Image (cartoon, rainbow, N blue to C red):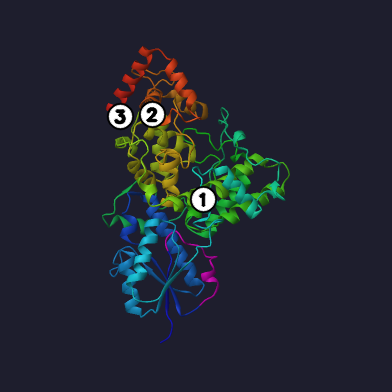
Amino acid sequence: MPTKTLRLVLGDQLNINHSWFSVVDDTITYVVMEIRTETDYATHHIQKVVGFFAAMRSFAFELIAKNHQVIYIKLNDEDNLQSFQSNIRQIVLQNKFTHFEYQWPDEYRLDQQLKNICQSIGIPSSAVDSEHFFTTRDELGHFFNGKKTFLLESFYRALRRKHGVLMEGDQPLSGKWNYDGENRRKLPKNHKPIAPLVFKNDVSSIFQEIKSTDIKTIGTFNPINFFWPISRAQSLQLLDFFVTECLPLFGSYQDAMSPNEWSLYHSRLSFSMNLKLISPQEVIDKAIKEWRKIPNKIEFNQLEGFVRQIIGWREYMRGIYWARMPEYANMNFFNNQKKLPVWFWTGKTKMNCLRDTINQSLEYAYAHHIQRLMITGNFALLAGTHPDAVDSWYLGIYIDAIEWVEITNTRGMSQFADGGIVGTKPYVSSASYIDKMSDYCGSCFYNKGLKTGEKSCPFNSLYWNFFDKNEDKLAKNARIGMMYNVWRKMQPEARAEILAQANYYLENVNEL
């Protein structure tokens, strides 16, 4: 009996440079599928669902153009059984495939599903690497074997050495590993960032197909002008735009926030990278090449800050995910139990910073890392929100959110629900940090300088309430011990007023 192989390509495995596709073989058929189990496991932003489907269809067309055999299952096809297992079993039986192959998925739930599928379909199966990341799944786990804390900086340096990125022998090219201290500037007054590169993809047919179902989504968009890249060619365009137009100021202002400036100098390449339309290697290579091209056009701190996000943070988060799943998804260090405020889904709040960040997220399916960490994530933690609720919101609303990168950032870095595996301290702040890094506070309904009173900024009283409530778990943390000294030095009456104010805000959180 002749060999016939079915190969599954997931929606985040759109890597045309994978070794699978280097040879055209008529005995191999690739299957790509749009299914309800993937649209329904979270309430996704409409742009996320559309973006995935558009990129998957574009990728399938590219495979067909290269003469590969492709089965593409659209969402509303009559024979779509709406799950990987059912569709694969049906295809194998109908087409008499003798072998099944897949690339290792990046999500734990899919890893388990595919292992179960292989056991149930009755033909030999195998899996290969996705050929995308700098590291293997278990590399971080081995690197930190026997250690209680997983320090990013040491892992980042090890990867720089291993892959020869910005190195001179065994030492960093500039003599310094990390320029984070130089990358925390607020946008100067009257500074206007460059207009972002956006695309004009007509995805109205996909939108109508989704609209004809009962799939629940959030957010808005214009289906005639879908502005995210949906192909490798567009992703490379966005990469070119970033390194030439944005990288020269990226590092300096990567933490800055400004109303109505949704893109600033960020690359917005995470969607393309997470779908594997482009690789982290070529992204870093392109940035370094641009830095070398014109002396002094791009300062080293701008470049290193970007490289650290790609080869450091991104690989680190993936390593944490595979080292600690599935138990990581259930960690709740503070035992927080509250729901998200209702305005997380509407943006209708009097707090400027949250209104702007949430409305931006609903409009663009995007917010940069400080908006996610120090605005929405900060408030969710101060409000005592259950990590499950925070995870679900982030996983759904952002176009680049796939669990392997979302949950470690959200449950770990943002909510400290892992008790310090990712972050050495909770990332919470009062209004002072938000004011330092943004223009939100000046025109806000609430007063950034007040801890109590009708118009006191909720971040202020909730900040001190957080430390008071969690003193038994945080007082011995060397990085925040100073805050407890400040808290204890306040007059008892002042502390009582602050806690009463925080309690009022928590009881009326949906009206803030």
Counting from the top left corner in percent of width and height, residue 466 is at 38, 28
- Which residue is painted at 37% across and 61% down in the image? 112
Q: For residue 219, say whether it is visible.
A: no
Identity, as a three-letter code, of the amino acid under mark 3: Val
Counting from the top left corner in percent of width and height, residue 168 is at 72, 49
- Which residue is painted at 35% across and 27% down in the image? 469
Vertical position of residue 249 compared to residue 16: above or below: above
Q: Which span of residues is magenta-colored?
A: 10-24
The residue beneath circle 3 is 509
Q: Are marks 1 and 3 in contact (CB under 8 Å)?
A: no
The residue beneath circle 1 is 145
Vertical position of residue 268 compared to residue 356: above or below: below
Label 1, label 3: how many angstroms apart (C-alpha)? 42 Å
The residue closer to the viewer here, 138 or 313, is 138
Mark 3, other Cα within 10 Å: few <14 / some 14–19 / many ≥20: some
> Disc 2 or 3, which lies upstream in sequence?
2
Task: Verify whether residue 18 appears in magenta.
Answer: yes
Give the quarter of the figure containing the C terminus.
Answer: top left
- Assign a secondary structure to mark 3: helix
The residue beneath circle 2 is 472
Q: Which residue lies furthest to the left in this view?
A: 214
- Assign a secondary structure to mark 2: helix
Assign the magenta stretch its main secondary structure: loop
Left or right of 340 in this view: 168: right
Label 2, label 1: how many angstroms apart (C-alpha)? 28 Å
> Disc 1 or 3, which lies upstream in sequence?
1
> Disc 2 or 1, which lies upstream in sequence?
1
- Quarter of the image where one finds residue 178: top right
